[in-house]
Each structure stands twice: as structure tokens, then as C-alpha cells.
Image (cartoon, rainbow, N blue to C red):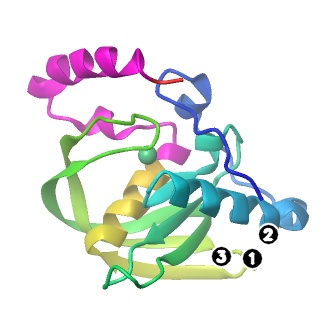
Amino acid sequence: MAILHVTKYGEPILRQKLKPVDYQKIAPQLPRLLKDMEETCLAVHGVGLAANQIGLPLRLAIILLPGEKEEDPPKRYVIINPKIVAKQGEKIEEEGCLSLPGLWAEVKRYTDVTVEFLDETGTPKKMRARGLLAKAFQHEVDHLDGKLFIDLVDPKSKPEVKKIIKKLRAQWD
Ligand SMILES: [Zn+2]
């Protein structure tokens, strides 16, 4: 088990649109990889982590949805080759990202999405989500498409966000 290095804004792999993985090919390494991703995500108090955030060009991500009570363990979702197939409702909310630590900015997201993916056993799933889970699905699918949440910031706020990123980058490893 290991806590992995999380790639930061500016690293080219975060801008790569990742191709779907062949489940059979990655299956042998999957249990270990998912455990490491989960540990890494927990260590940095994240809600989700995409494979390119640990430097791997694989179209998969995990989501650790916090439990209702603080003592409840998070619920883990593994999404392999995910695709958003339906979306509705819009809401502007503050968001952050493990690859842009320290930055919080308001972005517009759908409040209700339906996602198709393979779960960790390779079984095709279709799932409708609302609230934080819907947001997390969108955030992680964006990562796998090479997009970051700052791309969604209102154009008027972008110069300010750029300034903050410049300051923050000096503090990242
Ligand atoms: Zn992120």
C-alpha cells in the first residue's frame, strides 16, 4: 500500500484525453491500484481521484463520497471508462481539486447526471446521481477528458483565478 504523488496543475498528463481501458488487461493490477488510489485520496481529504492525477494514462477514477455522519466511512465508487449519458439542472457552487491544492472557485455543474461505466469487477453499470455525487462524477469524467474545473470558471473571474494559481504554485512540491 502506498500514498502516491498527486500530479499538479501544469503537468501535461492532466491535459490528456484518456482512451478507454481494456478491462481484462488492467484487471490483474486493479485491486492494488484502487487501494493505493483510495489511500492517497483519503490522505489528502479528497472526494475523488482520477488515474491521470497519479500519473497513469488510464480512463478510470475513484470517488469517495463522505458518509452522512462524520464517523461513517466514505462510500467508494470505482468508475472505469465512464461516460455521462444524461444531464439536467444547473447550479453554481464552489469547487476544489487535489491537482490545484488551495484553490476554491465557483463553477457551474449539472445537478443530476446519469453515468455509464464499468465497476471494479468489469460489470457495466448505469447510475443516476444527484448532489455531491453528481458533481464528483462530472469532475472526474472531466479529468479523464483532460479538463480541469478552472476551465469552467466564469470568464470574468479567470484573471483573478490565474493570479491565485501563480501564487499557489510556488508552494507546491
Ligand atoms: Zn480534481
Residue 86 disc label: none
Quarter that holds the C terminus: top right
Whichever of labels 1 and 2 marks the residue nearer the N terminus, that label is 2
Q: Name the residue under label 2.
A: 31
User: How far from the left and from the top, in percent, is residue 164?
Assistant: 24, 21
**Contact flag, marks 3 and 1 (Cβ < 8 Å):** yes
At label 3, the amino acid type is Asp
| Residue 65 sits above or below residue 94 on the image | below
Please state, as top left, top right, bottom left or bottom right, where the N terminus lies in the image: bottom right
Q: Which residue lies most toward the left here? A: 156
* Front residue of this view, candidates 8 and 24: 8
Q: Is the magenta stretch mostly helix, strand or loop?
A: helix
Work out whether 93 lies above or below 63.
Answer: above
Q: Which residue lies furthest to the front in this view?
A: 71
What residue is disc 3 on?
Answer: 119
The response on whether ligand 1 sits within 8 Å of label 2 is no
First to last magenta residue range: 143-171
